[in-house]
Image (cartoon, rainbow, N blue to C red):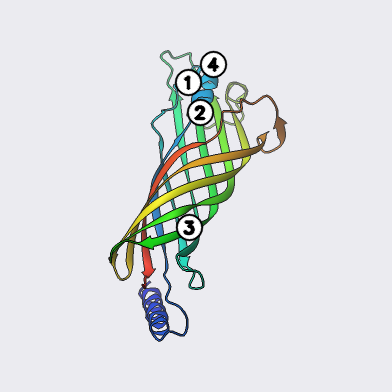
Amino acid sequence: MKRNFIIVGVFLLLISNISNAQFFNKFSLFGGPMVGWQVPNVTDLNTEIKKLGIPEFSNSGYLTLGGGGYIDVPLVAGLRIGAFGTGFTEDRVYTPTTNTSTFKTAKFSLRYAAISVEFNKKFSKHFDYTIGGNIGVGSTKLAVSQFNQNSGTWNLSNDTLLTSSFTNSFTATTYTFNPQIGVGYNVTKFMYLKLNAGYMFTLRGDWKLNDVLTVTNVPSGIKADGFNFNLGLNFGLFTD
């Protein structure tokens, strides 16, 4: 691990010296983790899971985790190109009130990778802002499960266990488009914080049950469209 940090440090110093020598226009190269908040419209989703007696999903949004890398392209002033991956998973559980009732769960998730294109502009020594967006591809998933209270004991030969417990996993390939704006702050020469806000539009392919059977008549509103926010902690080389 120590050797890796030394290699990265030497690499950054080498690029910094080359850039300062003006062999090419100055640029920034950075990346790191990001944490965010996605607020999808869950109205149609809640309508369906209420039919099963499962508690509704929250309208206030869900935590997203991910990370990516970016470069300010030296050939075009202000152009920033990057790539990242992120997503969320949220579940709801119905807990039985009697010994004869069954547990019921619903898990809703979005995972995707995207390419971003932005234009950034400095308005002070440490602050800048960006305007742009990203397009990506991933998957939206809804898994609905039911199992009885005896399922806590491992016994795959138990016919009652097999017939009373099930999981239906519905998955759809998802294409995303997310216009966004952002504000960045250079904490140090090698550390950069960036806060983004945007609105995601999605286009889904066919839903597949357990990745095999195509499912029809799925409500069109079961998707992850909505506002999103994320904060990235980036490390790298930042030049003016």
**Percent from the top left, x then y, of residue 60?**
38, 31
Amino acid type of the residue tagged 1 in the rendering: Ile
Q: Sequence-wise, which precedes: disc 4 or disc 2?
A: 4
Image quadrant for the C terminus?
A: bottom left
Amino acid type of the residue tagged 2 in the rendering: Ala
The residue depicted at 44 percent of the width and 14 percent of the height is: 99
Q: Secondary structure at mark 2?
A: strand
**Percent from the top left, x then y, of residue 220?**
61, 28
Residue assigned mark 1: 54
CA separation in Å, label 1 and label 2: 7 Å
Residue assigned mark 3: 118
**Percent from the top left, x then y, of residue 224?**
52, 36
- The dot on residue 191 is none
The residue depicted at 51 percent of the width and 46 percent of the height is: 178
Q: Is residue 155 left or right of residue 77?
A: right
Residue assigned mark 4: 51
Residue assigned mark 2: 106
Q: Residues within 10 Å of mark 1 (few under 14, many from 20)?
A: some
Q: Secondary structure at mark 3?
A: strand
